[in-house]
Amino acid sequence: MNSYDIAIQISREPRFIKRNFIYPKSFHWRYLLYRLARPCLKLVYKIFKLTHPYRPWTSQASIRIFENILNRDMIGLEYGSGNSTIFFARRLRHLTSVEHHEGWYRTVHKQLRALGLSNVDYHLIPTQASEVDHQYTFYKDFGFTEKDFQVRKEYHSYFSFVTRYPSEHFDFILVDGRARVECALLAIPKLKPGGIFVLDNSDRTRYIPIFTALKSWKKVTTTTGLFDTTIWFKPERT
């Protein structure tokens, strides 16, 4: 069974909330039921985080999927650090992690040292004013134009970090930080055939360009009932 089939199987387990439970805003009884359930969903997720330390703050189903498809032969990259950094470092051969917040960076760096996790390249890249008028073209590779794509230049050093790596370098990439669309579009070419690409909070409409860019890839979208985590699987080379 391949990684996609495993992910599908796990996402369909009865214990996990299904995406169709979330009904769009309306006067329909299903939406009213969903709104009534939200406080319970928040409590369930809060309890889950408290009782499952060192787990990513992604959906419960996605974490179960990660536990089943990641292995010690893989090289990973994450934008946005935290519990996920510890979780992935324990399951991958090597992890590169990028963080923009200095205080949070120091907290996570201290945890990594205390736990003896030496297989992480951890980088602090704070927001900064862009003094150079960069000419961006990467989004054009995915069919986007200047009219429908506005680059967040204050995160130039942050989202450009991944360009230092060669194409098809990583087995696993998680985007859960700042400037996610820019990070995603630049990171996609760095993923190996058969690799795994993850976007957290994928229900947010501003991330639609990522879905457009990856429309030909197989995907599994999981949810907490509050937010979604989508996992894509890059096609194997034929």
Image (cartoon, rainbow, N blue to C red):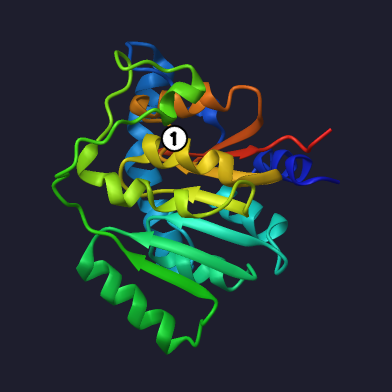
Q: Position of residue 83 (x, y in %)?
A: 42, 66
Residue 142 as seen in the image, left or right of residue 204: right
Displayed quadrant of residue 64? bottom right
Q: Position of residue 231 (x, y in %)?
A: 59, 40
| Front in this rendered view, residue 25 or 83 | 83
What residue is shown at x 30% (from left), y 31% (from top)? 135
Secondary structure of the residue carrying numbered label 1: loop
Name the image quarter holding the C terminus. top right
Q: Position of residue 73 (x, y in %)?
A: 72, 66
Q: Position of residue 7 (x, y in %)?
A: 70, 44
When the figure is inspected, residue 159 is found, relative to residue 120, above or below; the finding is: above
What residue is shown at x 60% (from left), y 46% (from top)? 167
- Residue at the spot of label 1: 202
When the figure is inspected, residue 169 is found, relative to residue 150, above or below; the finding is: below
Report the number of numbered marks: 1
What residue is shown at x 36% (from left), y 30% (from top)? 204
